Image: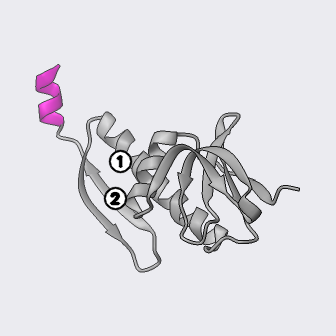
């Protein structure tokens, strides 16, 4: 009997997820196996190795990614982990979209409540001259 749980997320972009996990200091492996109880393994596109042998993995499930892990032996709180990853993912998505649309990041700060404030600007004169 498998101990692995699958938790659906709203995350969809593997590249953004990979960058977000790395930004948070996690060492990841791509296209690897997630370790669980009793040596059980399951495949995932992104695997976060944990020191106690119970890993966290992300794999495609339709249009989104799901977290797959053996929650019984997990060394981190899955809800806190997912919230932290989702916040970093959202930050990276905003920055990617803003830079693609010609904005520059002027300021970024983490507020007292833990939210992230990003200030962007676009130089309209440069854009008009380029056209």
Q: Secondary structure at mark 1?
A: helix
The spot of residue 48 in percent (x, y) is: 53, 57
Label 2, secondary structure: give it. strand
Badge 2 crowding class, 10 Å Cα cut-off, few under 14, some 14 to 19, many 20 or more, is some
Q: Which of the 4 image quarters holds residue 25? A: bottom left
Q: Residue 42 location in percent, x, y?
A: 70, 48
Q: Residue furthest front?
A: 39
Whether 97 is drawn above or below 119: the answer is: above
Left or right of 51, for residue 73:
right
Display colour scheme: one colour
| Label 1 – label 2 distance at C-alpha | 8 Å
The image shows residue 37, relative to residue 22, as above or below, that is below
Query: In the rendered image, which residue does mark 2 sit on?
Result: 118
Q: For the point 42% across and 63% down, which residue is it?
A: 24
Residue under the point 40% across and 56% down? 22
Q: Earlier in the sequence, mark 1 or mark 2?
A: 1
| Front-most of residues 29 and 119 | 29
The image quadrant that residue 32 belongs to is: top right
Cβ–Cβ under 8 Å for marks 1 and 2: yes
Where residue 130 appears, as percent x and y from the top left, is 14, 23
Q: Quarter holding the C terminus?
A: top left
Q: Position of residue 58 (x, y in %)?
A: 61, 48
Local packing at callout 1 (Cα closer than 10 Å; few below 14, some 14-19, many 20+) is some
Q: Which residue is mark 1?
A: 95
Question: Where does the magenta region start and end?
Answer: 124-131
Q: Residue at x 76, y 64 (%)?
A: 38
Q: Residue at x 70, y 51 (%)?
A: 41
User: In the rendered structure, does residue 122 fall within the stretch colored magenta?
Assistant: no
């Amino acid at each position: 009997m498998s101990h692995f749980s699958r938790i659906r997320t709203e995350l969809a972009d593997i590249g953004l997820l990979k960058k977000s996990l790395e930004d948070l200091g996690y060492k990841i492996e791509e296209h690897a196996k997630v370790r669980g109880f009793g040596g059980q393994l399951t495949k995932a596109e992104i695997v976060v190795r944990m020191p106690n042998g119970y890993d966290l993995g992300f794999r495609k499930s339709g249009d989104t990614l799901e977290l797959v892990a053996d929650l019984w032996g997990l060394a981190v709180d899955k809800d806190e982990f997912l919230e932290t990853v989702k916040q970093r993912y959202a930050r990276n998505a905003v920055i990617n979209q803003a830079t693609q649309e010609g904005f520059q990041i002027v300021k970024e700060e983490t507020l007292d409540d833990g939210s992230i404030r990003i200030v962007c600007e676009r130089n309209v004169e440069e854009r008009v001259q380029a056209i």
